[in-house]
Image (tube, rainbow, N blue to C red):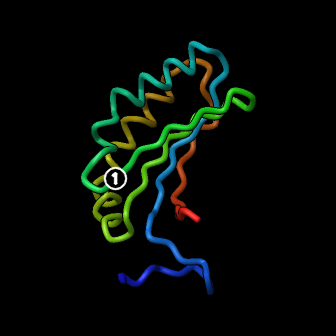
Amino acid sequence: FAIMPTIAPSVDFTIICREIRCKWSTPESLTACQSVLASNLSGLKGESRKVIRMVCGSCNDFKIQTLVPCEAFGDFESGGFGGESAILEGLKGVEGVSGIETQTITHTEM
């Protein structure tokens, strides 16, 4: 077994998630968010990386999560998070999109 990083006793993880999130306001702005993701998806995907898109129709969240094994996260980070800056710029250019943020968090299936 590989040793898993630990945040606190019994809080271990093997995956680090880089999340990009924003709020959309109209169906057109949501469609544009999806287009920004589609145009940049190949940069996020990579060997051992998994990309998840989440959309909430009631609170208008649009989230892109890239799941990366801990041992590969340093390279992903130093490489600019798979083109994250292009995604952020693309989202900033969408009328009706607000609250653009990023976060690095752990991910563990229970």
Residue 20, given in percent of the width and then of the height, sits at 51, 44
Residue 29, given in percent of the width and then of the height, sits at 57, 18
- Between residues 36 and 98, which one lies in front from this camera angle? 36
Which residue position is annotated with label 1? 49
Q: Looking at the picture, does residue 75 appear above or below residue 42? A: below
List the single residue furthest toward the left: 47
List the single residue furthest toward the right: 58
Q: Is residue 77 left or right of residue 91?
A: left
Number of residues whose C-alpha sits closer than 10 Å to that of mark 1, classed few (under 14), some (14–19) or many (20 or more): some
- Between residues 78 and 67, which one lies in front from this camera angle? 67
Number of numbered tags placed on the structure image: 1
**Residue visible at 55% across and 39% down in the picture:** 63
Residue 24, given in percent of the width and then of the height, sits at 63, 25
In the picture, the quarter occupied by the C terminus is: bottom right
In the picture, the quarter occupied by the N terminus is: bottom left
**Residue visible at 60% across and 78% down in the picture:** 11
Residue 54, given in percent of the width and then of the height, sits at 56, 37
Q: Is residue 72 left or right of residue 24?
A: left
Q: Is residue 13 left or right of residue 8?
A: left
List the single residue furthest toward the top: 28
Which picture quadrant has residue 37?
top left
Q: Secondary structure at mark 1?
A: loop
**Residue visible at 42% across and 22% down in the picture:** 35
**Residue visible at 43% across and 28% down in the picture:** 90
Disc 1 marks a residue whose amino acid type is Arg
